[in-house]
Image (cartoon, grey):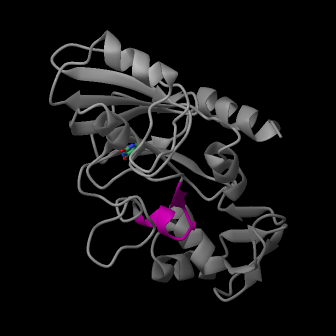
Amino acid sequence: MPFMRIDKLISQWGFGSRKEVKTILKQGAVTVDGHVVTRPETRIDPEVSVIYVGDELIEYEKYVYIMMNKPDGVISATYDEEDNTVIDLLEDKYQWMSLFPVGRLDKDTTGLIILTNDGGFAHRALSPKKHVEKVYVAQLDKEIGEKEIGVFAAGVMLDDGYRCMSAVLEGLTDNYAKITIKEGKFHQVKRMFAAVGIDVLALKRIAFAGIDLDEGMATGEYRRLNENEMNIVANLLSKD
Ligand code: URA
C-alpha cells in the first residue's frame, strides 16, 4: 500500500467528504501514531500507522471480500463503456479499494459473485488446477432425464471438442436443474446443455468455492463475507 493522504483515507473510511474531513483535522481530532495531524495533505501508510479519529481506532483492512447477488444485465468487470458493472453497483467507500470480480458470470447470469482486492485469493479460486466447485440453478427449455445426468457425469463434449470434467446434474421441478461443475470455461454451463440439445433460459449461481449465496439478498445487494465464509477463504488461501 503506497502512502496516502490522510484526508482521503479518513473520508474513505466514512467520516464525510474531504471538506468535512478537513474540518475534523483542523479541530485536532485525528492522531497518527500518537501525534495530532492537522494538515490534510499529510501522507501516511495505513498499514503501519495507528490512526484515531476522536476515540475511534481506524482498523485498516488490507483485503476486502464481498458477496454480491449479481443482477441480470450487469457486466462482471471493473469497467465497461456501455453497461453497469458489478463494481458500479458498490457504494462510494468501496470505489477506491481496487475491487474486482473473482471470475466472470455472463451478463444475463444472476447470483453469487465474489468481489475482492485479494489477487492471491482470486488466483487460487480460479486456478484450473484447484477444481473449485461452482453450483448453478438453470431454467431449461425442457426437462432433463437420466440420459443427460449420465452424459454430464461422464464428461460432456463441448462444441470445440473439449471434454468437460465430470459434473453433477440434478433435476428440480418445472424444468429447473442444479448443476455442479469444477471448472470455468467460457459460457460453460450453457454450452454443456447445448451439447445435449437443451437451451438455458436463465442461469443463477448459488455457490462458489464452498460459499453459498445468501438467499436473503435481493439481486443487486451485497455484503461483506461473514466469519464462516472468511474461514472458507482462509482455508483456500492456506492450500498450495
Ligand atoms: N456458465 C455459463 O454458461 N454462464 C455463466 O455465466 C457461468 C457459467
At 26% from the left edge and 75% from the top edge, which residue is drawn?
82
Number of numbered callouts drawn: 0
At 59% from the left edge and 70% from the top edge, which residue is drawn?
10
At 68% from the left edge and 70% from the top edge, which residue is drawn?
30
Q: Give the residue furthest to the front.
A: 161
User: Of 44 and 194, which appears nearest the observer?
Assistant: 194
User: Of 136 and 88, which appears nearest the observer?
Assistant: 136
Determine which quarter of the picture holds residue 39.
bottom right
Q: Is residue 194 above or below residue 17?
A: above
Drawn side of residue 106 relative to residue 157, left or right: left
Answer yes or no: is residue 62 visible.
no
Where does the magenta region start and end? 92-101
Question: Residue 116 colored magenta?
Answer: no
Q: Position of residue 111 (x, y in %)?
A: 35, 39
Determine which quarter of the picture holds residue 74.
bottom left
Q: Position of residue 190 (x, y in %)?
A: 32, 41
At 44% from the left edge and 51% from the top edge, which residue is drawn?
160
Figure quadrant of the C terminus: top right
User: Of 19 and 78, which appears nearest the observer?
Assistant: 78
Q: Position of residue 218 (x, y in %)?
A: 27, 38
Q: Quadrant of ligand 1?
A: top left
Figure quadrant of the N terminus: bottom right
User: Of 217 and 114, which appears nearest the observer?
Assistant: 114
Q: Is residue 96 above or below residue 240?
A: below
Drawn side of residue 204 relative to residue 227, left or right: left
Q: Is residue 212 above or below residue 76?
A: above
Answer yes or no: is residue 2 visible.
yes
Drawn side of residue 62 relative to residue 19, left or right: right
Q: Position of residue 20 (x, y in %)?
A: 47, 77
